[in-house]
Amino acid sequence: METNGPGTTVGVNVSLSGTLKDQNDIAVFGMVEGEVISEKSVTIGQTAQVKGPIKGELVTVAGVVRGAITASDKFELLETGKVFGSISTKNLVIHSGGIFVGKSEMPTGEETVEEPEEVENEPDQSSTEETLIPDEE
Amino acid sequence: MYYYIMEPPSSRAVRQTYQRLRDLLTNLGIAGEMMAASPARTPEELAMMGLERGYSTIVAVGGDAFVNYIARTIIGQAVLGVIPIGEAGQVSELIGTNNLKTAAEFLKFRRLSTFNTVTADPDTLIFLDGIIEPPKLAKVSFVIDGKLRGYAYFNKLKVTRNLDILIESQHLVEPMKILGLFSVGGTVIKSVSQFHGRNVRLTTEPDLALLVNRQPIARTPLQLRLNPNSLKVITKRGSIL
């Protein structure tokens, strides 16, 4: 299911299985077994139970999630929320009372900046050696 | 020149409105061939006749369900014009007026908007919102684009021309009695769901009718298919909606 309509809402008494994908916001208040993917926000309501990975720009959890969560912008676990799985996000907020069992990853751009500096030192050393060679002769 | 198909008049007042409309159209210079639907000549048959005679614009004069019937016949073959009369809330909103004179003027200016429609296999067209309203809470199972399966209990289910599926339910959770004396609970649980796709299969238990303006147009199980930008309609402002 992939469209650019007005968004998707999964009501309290709805049970789904499969891939729930939408270009707009997704709100889940029922049960979902499978992937939940949005290009915008994903809200897991207090009555919701999701078993599967969640991907979105902004992910907010007030219900129960068992699976990996990837929030490209921000992840927020509310006081009633429970997450059993991994979280990958730049901005992580866990409210008091929220339960998180798993590992979190916060990707930053810093590691990739340091690497080129080390590489630049090596050519400098080799150029010093080259200048010594004519002196020895 | 336009080809007009009129819904059978439900009252003397509607007959008088039709006469007023004839005068209006003549004054605007867009009077064309006018046909009145009847049990002997259905709106579909009249629309087919219009297409066979080479009309490129067919105007439905009537309520929501009547307009939906005409749209079903002419889709992809002619432009739809609408004069809303009677119970025509949806179609009035769609063209931008519920006023007879203004609707006639829209026909003269002929600004076209293109709308999505939905086909319920084999050949039922959903141009205006279709509603399923069971007398009591019923179960619906659905498959959306072959990727998402689910079920829900509902009191009302709506199918729009953009193939949005809106499912609403409201039911009371019975109160629990403690020691036969105290009641706990008894809350009303409301649920609203919205899905959309390009191909949707709906099955209900039991089988139920899909209604447009309280008139049945199809029955579950339904295989629904989105037809993007498939129907051209004369509206207030021309645009792709």
Image (spheres, rainbow, N blue to C red):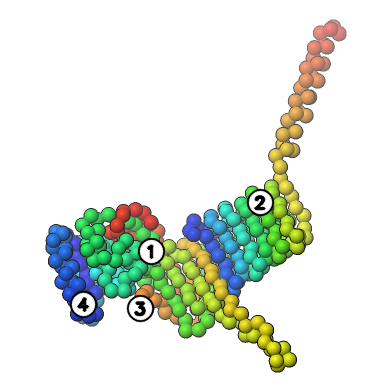
Query: In front of the other: label 1 or label 4?
Result: 4
Task: Name the residue that disc number 3 marks.
Answer: B215
Residue at x 13%, y 63% (from the top left corner): B26
Does residue B83 appear anywhere in the picture?
Answer: yes
Dot 2 amino acid type: Lys
Q: Secondary structure at mark 2?
A: strand
Asked if badges 2 and 3 are on one and the same chain, I answer no
Tell whether B19 sits left or right of B189. left
Question: Mark 4 or 3 closer to N-term?
Answer: 4
Nearest the viewer among A80 and B55 is A80
Q: Are marks 1 and 4 on the same chain?
A: yes
The span from disc 1 to disc 4 (Cα, nearest Å) is: 32 Å
The chain under label 1 reads: B
Q: Quadrant of residue B100?
A: bottom left
Q: Secondary structure at mark 1?
A: strand
How far apart marks 2 and 3 lie (CA) works out to: 48 Å
- Which residue, as the protein is rendered here, is positioned at the far bottom? B180
Q: Position of residue A59 (x, y in %)?
A: 64, 56
Mark 3 neighbour density, 10 Å: few (under 14) some (14–19) many (20 or more): some
Residue A32 seen: no
Q: Nearer the viewer, mark 4 or mark 3?
A: 4
Residue at x 50% of width, y 84% of height: B136
Q: Nearer the viewer, mark 2 or mark 3?
A: 2
